[in-house]
Amino acid sequence: GTAQIGVTGLAVMGRNLARNFARNGFTVAVHNRTAARTRALVEEFGGEGTFVAAESPEEFVAALERPRRLVIMVKAGDATDAVIEEFAPLLEEGDVIIDGGNAHFADTRRREKELRERGIHFVGVGISGGEEGALHGPSIMPGGSAESYASLGPLLERIAAKAPDGTPCVTHVGPDGAGHFVKMVHNGIEYADMQLIAEAYHLLRTVAGYSPEQIAQTFRTWNTGRLDSYLIEITAEVLAHTDAATDRPFVDVVMDQAEQKGTGRWTVQIALDLGVPVSGIAEAVFARSLSGHAELREVSRSLPGPQPRPLDAEEAGRFADRVEQALYASKIVSYTQGFHQVQAGSEAYGWEVDAGSVAAIWRAGCIIRAAFLDRIRGAYDEQRDLPSLLADKQFAEEIGAAQDDWRDVVATAARQGVPTPGFAAALAYYDALRAERLPAALTQGQRDFFGAHTYRRTDREGSFHTLWGGDRSEVTAD
Ligand code: 6PG
């Protein structure tokens, strides 16, 4: 075969990824279960590069140079296993199967192990950036063996987005499922970012009394500063859009029930297993599910709330500035939590993920791309084993400078009856970490009271139990 890479599964993501490889000078074998799609791709985009259309799995495999590199772009789940089973028997030792779908990292670990035993490399790759990213340069998060990355990396570097300093947004994240794990956390952070932006919008709309167009303008201004990011940019676009059918703001005609495909939920499920407090991401997932409970919202609509107190223009402007501070501070917390999860996953699975390189490859191409990520990369560059982003001097200073306004926004939201679970959870996380003493001591006392679950003391080593039902003397446990 002559093709350096093959793509099977030519729905929009697969098609765009194949075109991206071809546009970068690679010969690309393309295959789809229904051959009409393969033909359509070559007919429509054949001029962009060199494609080899394959009608059957055998033809597809034969079209690839060795070691073969074939990318599977099908819906994550059973379809991935089915396609692997279709191709694996046709492959030879050293060939590489690449899964570019949004797979659960546990599935990727299982597949990698099974295929490794058959002499085939399996690389789970997180790809972010949607359809446009796939075509023009996504952020790419490959796991799998270092050996497979040596053969695959140079190709991925060509098609990946380039950070402002020119570095390709791809790195070997770590073995087996590390790439899909990091993509999962990326999506969790994406949910949190979106929720925080939504809360900022809600506050500006309800408390400041701004129109969607005014809020779009506010976001455009914010986007020239430290909040500079893709999500803020597109939010301004969405808010400024007018619905053609009704001539009303688009945001007012869309059903207010947020959906999800599941990667944010996975982030939280895994965080619970790892014991990582990703409260901001969790609130974002719950906010989406709450919005979808139409029946609960219906029966709750008449519950009492505060009288809204509209602000005058000057007050509104000052409030908007404070919302910017709250948004930025909460964003620092989301990323702190997300990176904590990356590090916890890396430790639990022995991946040795470099947090700084993860921040570096999120600087362009992906949905959460932002100027901010270069700062995170810088923080990890300065201290590779930084225990928390909040331990970075600059972030600590910024969040400290924002905290008064942040508190004011959360308090105002509570007073005016605007739900801000993301801002509030982020602030609670900040305050809990700051606290000299937490009421966890009381929790331990309660656990010991009702279940003899024991506690440790601040002044002595060991585990202790108080005889609550007896004379309340203390005994040493175990
Ligand atoms: C990306 C996105 C993408 C994700 C969608 C939809 O990085 O390109 O994260 O992978 O699937 O954004 O996610 P939800 O349907 O769960 O909102």
Image (cartoon, grey):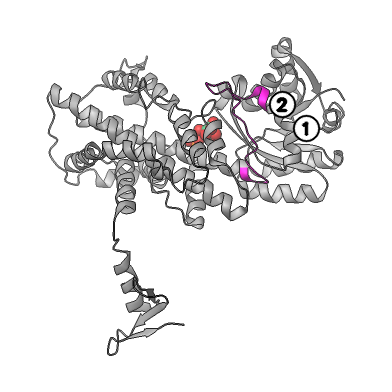
Classify residue 251 as left or right of residue 363: left
In this view, the residue in front, 124 or 382, is 382
The percent coordinates of residue 3 (x first, y second) are 81, 23
The label on residue 155 is 2
Which residue is painted at 77% across and 42% down in the image?
Answer: 121
- Which range is magenta? 157-178
Q: Is residue 287 above or below residue 447?
A: above
Residue 175 pos. (x, y %): 67, 45
Q: Residue 397's image quarter?
A: top left
Q: Nearer the viewer, mark 1 or mark 2?
A: 2
Q: CA distance from mark 1 to mark 2?
A: 10 Å
Give the x, y percent position of residue 156. Answer: 68, 28
Q: Residues within 10 Å of mark 2 (few under 14, many from 20)?
A: some
Location of residue 221 with respect to 373 vertically, above or below: above
Tell me the SS state at disc 2.
helix
Q: Residue at x 73, y 32 (%)?
A: 152
**Crowdedness of circle 1 by 10 Å Cα count: few (<14), some, many (20+)?**
many
Is mark 1 in CB contact (under 8 Å) with mark 2?
yes
The answer to whether any part of residue 441 appears in the image is yes
| Badge number at residue 69 | 1
Q: Is residue 383 left or right of residue 103?
A: left
Q: Which mark is residue 17?
A: none
In the image shown, does 84 or 199 lie closer to the viewer?
199
Q: Nearer the viewer, residue 243 or 169?
A: 169
The one nearer the camera, 318 or 198, is: 318
330 part of magenta stretch: no
Residue at 61% across / 53% down in the picture? 349
Q: Secondary structure at mark 1?
A: strand
Q: Position of residue 328 (x, y in %)?
A: 34, 34
Instruction: Tell me which secondary structure the magenta stretch mostly adopts.
Output: loop
Residue farthest along the front direction in this orientation: 382
What amino acid does circle 2 point to?
Answer: Leu
